[in-house]
Image (cartoon, helix red, strand yellow):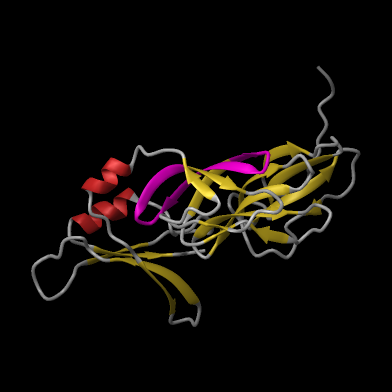
Amino acid sequence: GGTLELLTDQPGPDHQPAWSPDGRIVYSRSILEPGYESGRRRILAWPVAGGEPTEITDNLDHHVFRFQVEDDGNLLALVDHEGTWQMGRLFPAEPGKMIALTVGAGWLWGFHSAGGRAVGVATAADHPSQLWELDVGPSSEIVTLIWGETRGKRTLSTHNESFEGLVERSVPRRAWVDSTSGARVHVWYYPPVRKTQGPRTPMIVTLHGGPQWCVGDRWDPEIQALTGAGYGVLAVNFT
C-alpha cells in the first residue's frame, strides 16, 4: 500500500504510462486538449519528483499510437504518416527529434522490441495481417514495409497465405485531391474486383466524423467485400 499521488494534471486524457530506465520519469501518451479525441496524441515526460512535463514529440506533426521505452532510455514509437503507421525512434534528451525506422505503403498495428529486434503485426491495403520480425537496432537500415521485400525483416507467420491464394483482392490507387474549400485530401480508390454490367461503375464513398483515426494502407475486409461485389470504393482520409 501507500499514498496515491496525482502525477499528471493536464486537461486531456493520458494513456500508456511507462517508466524510464532510471525510474525518474514516467512517460505517457497524452492529449493536451480537453475532451475525447480532441487533439494530437503526444508523448509527455513527467518528472516523478514533480514539475512540468516535457513533450518528447514537440513540433512533430504526427499522432503517436504506441510506444516502448528502450534500455538506453530512448523510445520506439508508432506514428501516423500519410495514411500509414510507421515506426520511429524518439530521443528524450532531444525533444522533437525522430529517426524513421520504417517506410513504405504498409501498416504496423503493434510491436514489441528487445535487443535491436522488434516483432510487429504488419498489414497492407491488399494483404491481411502477418507477424514480422524487424531489425530496429541503432545502426540498422530503414525497413521497407512492402510485401516481397525482405531486407531488414522476416515473416514469422504464414496463416493468411492460403487465403491470399484463393481470394482476388482489390489493390487501391492513392491520390491527393483538392477540395472545394482548397484543402488537400488524401484518398484511396479501390477498383471493383468484378465489373458490373453497364457503362458506369457503382461507387461507395466511406467517410468518418473524425477528428482522429485515419484511412490508410491497411487491410479492410469490408472494403474488400464491397469490391468483390462489384463496387468501387473511395476511402477518404479525414485526418
Q: Is residue 162 visible?
A: yes
Q: Residue at x 18, y 56 (%)?
A: 229
- Of residues 97 and 59, the one nearer the viewer is 97
Where residue 174 appears, as percent x and y from the top left, is 40, 70
- Of residues 209 and 173, the one nearer the viewer is 173
Tell which residue pokes out farthest to the front in this image. 151
- Magenta span includes 188: no
Where residue 126 appears, as percent x and y from the top left, is 34, 55
Quarter holding the N terminus? top right
Q: How many labels does the image show?
A: 0
Which of the 4 image quarters holds residue 90? bottom right
Specify the principal SS of the magenta part. strand
Tell which residue pokes out farthest to the left in this image. 197
- Of residues 150 and 134, the one nearer the viewer is 150
Where residue 169 appears, as percent x and y from the top left, is 27, 55
Q: Is residue 32 visible?
A: no
Q: Which residue is drawn at 75% across and 43% down?
A: 27
Tell which residue pokes out farthest to the top in this image. 1
- Magenta span includes 126: yes
Q: Is residue 99 above or below residue 123?
A: below
Q: In the drawing, does residue 125 fall left or right of residue 47?
A: left
What range is drawn magenta here?
112-131
Q: In the drawing, does residue 232 fall left or right of residue 46?
A: left
Q: Residue at x 69, y 60 (%)?
A: 99
Q: Which residue is drawn at 81% across and 35% down?
A: 6
Where residue 34 appears, as percent x and y from the top left, is 67, 52
Q: In the drawing, does residue 4 fall left or right of residue 85?
A: right
